[in-house]
Image (spheres, grey):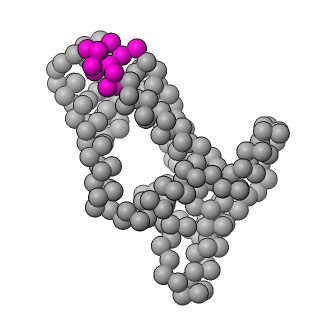
Amino acid sequence: MVTLALLTGLGMGDESGSGPMLVAHVGSVVLIGTGLVAAFVFGDRAALLSSSRRLFTPDRRDIAWLREHARNPLAASSRHDWGLFNTGQKMLAWMLTASMAAVIGTGIQSWLAGGEGGLHGAAVVLCAALLGAHIFMAVINPSTRPALHGMVFGRVRRPWAAKHHAAWLAAIDQADSEGTNFDRSQH
């Protein structure tokens, strides 16, 4: 749906006032919103909220990583025992959320102004660049490609999790050894 929204928006060009392309564009945007609402209403709300909280809340590891890179931005990163999300994933989520809010806000403004959006195109370009970075990391980058399987199927291989998200794996192992009912998506 995001691709359809992007392509129909590009396809409208200066003719954004009416027509089937506008209907497809607005329809795809409505379907995206409907899907998000449906995921919250009919999905596992506890897991969604827990994952969202972990994704949008910095922790001590994130602060240490940011300090390390503020002091020496070009240095190789020291290894951190990441939880479910690392600092890069969190930063991308924050930036994508802000850019999507800008796309929605400028899109509504453009629509109300009869297609004279001004900043909507710039917001779309920024969001598309961030989505491109996300796709690159998930599909092309060999060190993070196994995460794609986790995004699609909800599982990753244990050795990859141990290397990239050791704190999350340790929490799962501890819960398993204690016999605790543990939702792996929440830690």
- The residue closer to the viewer here, 143 or 42, is 42
Please say whether residue 39 is one of the residues in the magenta stretch. no
Residue for point 47% across, 73% down: 183
Residue for point 50% across, 70% down: 184
In this view of the protein, can residue 5 be seen by the observer? yes
Q: Is residue 32 left or right of residue 87?
A: left
Q: Position of residue 108 (x, y in %)?
A: 31, 25
Q: Residue furthest left?
A: 19
Q: Position of residue 15 (x, y in %)?
A: 25, 13
Q: Position of residue 176 (x, y in %)?
A: 56, 83
Residue for point 30% across, 43% down: 33
Give the total of numbered labels: 0
The magenta stretch is 107-118
The quarter of the picture where the N terminus appears is top left
Please say whether residue 114 is one of the residues in the magenta stretch. yes
Q: Is residue 72 left or right of residue 98?
A: right
Is 104 drawn above or below residue 113 in the view shown?
below
The quarter of the picture where the C terminus appears is bottom right
Query: Which picture quadrant has residue 153?
Result: bottom left
Query: Which picture quadrant has residue 104?
Result: top left
Q: Is residue 86 left or right of residue 153?
A: right
Is 83 drawn above or below residue 138 in the view shown?
below
Residue for point 65% across, 73% down: 170
Q: Position of residue 61 (x, y in %)?
A: 71, 56
Q: Is residue 62 left or right of residue 134?
A: right
In this view of the protein, can residue 160 be seen by the observer? no
